[in-house]
Image (tube, grey):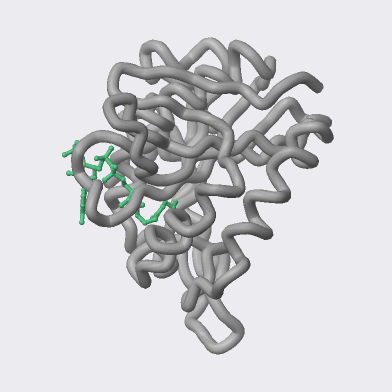
Amino acid sequence: MGERPTLETERLILRPFRATDAAEVRRLAGDPEIASTTLNIPHPYEPGMAETWIATHQPGHEEGRLVNFAVTRREGGSLLGAVGLVVSPAHARAELGYWIGREHWNQGYATEAARAVVRHGFEALGLNRVVAHHFSRNPASGRVLEKAGMLREGRLPQHVRKSDAGPFEDLEIYGVLAGHTATGKNPPVSPRRRGHARDP
Ligand SMILES: CC(C)(COP(=O)(O)OP(=O)(O)OC[C@H]1O[C@@H](n2cnc3c(N)ncnc32)[C@H](O)[C@@H]1OP(=O)(O)O)[C@@H](O)C(=O)NCCC(=O)NCCS
């Protein structure tokens, strides 16, 4: 595998994380609102966690399992958040994930980043399918996925819990197949479920 990729969009540069991003990652991802709606981000976000996480990116890239991008503003270069794919090479499939620092919400950054990464997954990585999950109580993430051309495929009742003591929580699953991103159209999961594909 070569160098980790960099993608450009209208307002953003999606580049590999560097060790020097760790303090800002900790500041942004350390917000309890980020931990609340992500499965793998803990709270409190302890010192050293960002460094450890960033150090997994190069080996993950070399093994073809991970593509993580720092979401940075084209103008000024500030770090806004993270977006990435966890790849299952055997199935040419990946799971999309992202977070944006709270001070930057609702400006379309997650959507812009997600669109670029989904396109990268199909065009550069040759994926057949991209999926994403979000907590049912996190509708903003569902909007991001819809705006990125993905379709809601269903709900997974009580599928996860954030911690051992926490409640079991429902997830929504979204997906898109290669060749279907431009229009946002996607074949239904089955004819029976066609009517549910765009339920709120
Ligand atoms: C989810 C998250 C990534 C969205 O980032 P963002 O940059 O604000 O997203 P965008 O601006 O591209 O789009 C947000 C959309 O959600 C909508 N939205 C925001 N809050 C909402 C709410 N409570 N209910 C419904 N829609 C909501 C916005 O209006 C916008 O949609 P619109 O363009 O149709 O108006 C961000 O809130 C975040 O990082 N949350 C914490 C981590 C997380 O949940 N990550 C996703 C895990 S699946």
**How many labels, in total?**
0
Quadrant into which the N terminus falls: top right
Q: Is residue 11 found left or right of 136 in the rendered image?
A: left
Residue at the (24%, 48%) spot, across then down: 105
> On screen, 175 above or below 140?
above
Question: Which quadrant holds residue 4?
Answer: top right
Residue at the (40%, 62%) spot, across then down: 27
Q: Nearer the viewer, residue 85 or 136?
A: 85
Q: At which x and y percent is residue 190?
A: 54, 31
Q: At which x and y percent is residue 141?
A: 35, 47
Residue at the (70%, 36%) spot, across then down: 87
Question: Is residue 200 visible in this depiction of the protein?
Answer: yes
Question: Is residue 171 visible in this depiction of the protein?
Answer: no
> On screen, 42 above or below 20?
below
Residue at the (70%, 50%) spot, across then down: 55
Q: At which x and y percent is residue 48?
A: 62, 67
Q: Residue furthest left?
A: 107
Q: Is residue 89 found left or right of 149 in the rendered image?
A: right
Question: Which quadrant holds residue 35?
Answer: bottom left
Q: At which x and y percent is residue 136?
A: 38, 59
> On screen, 157 above or below 154?
below
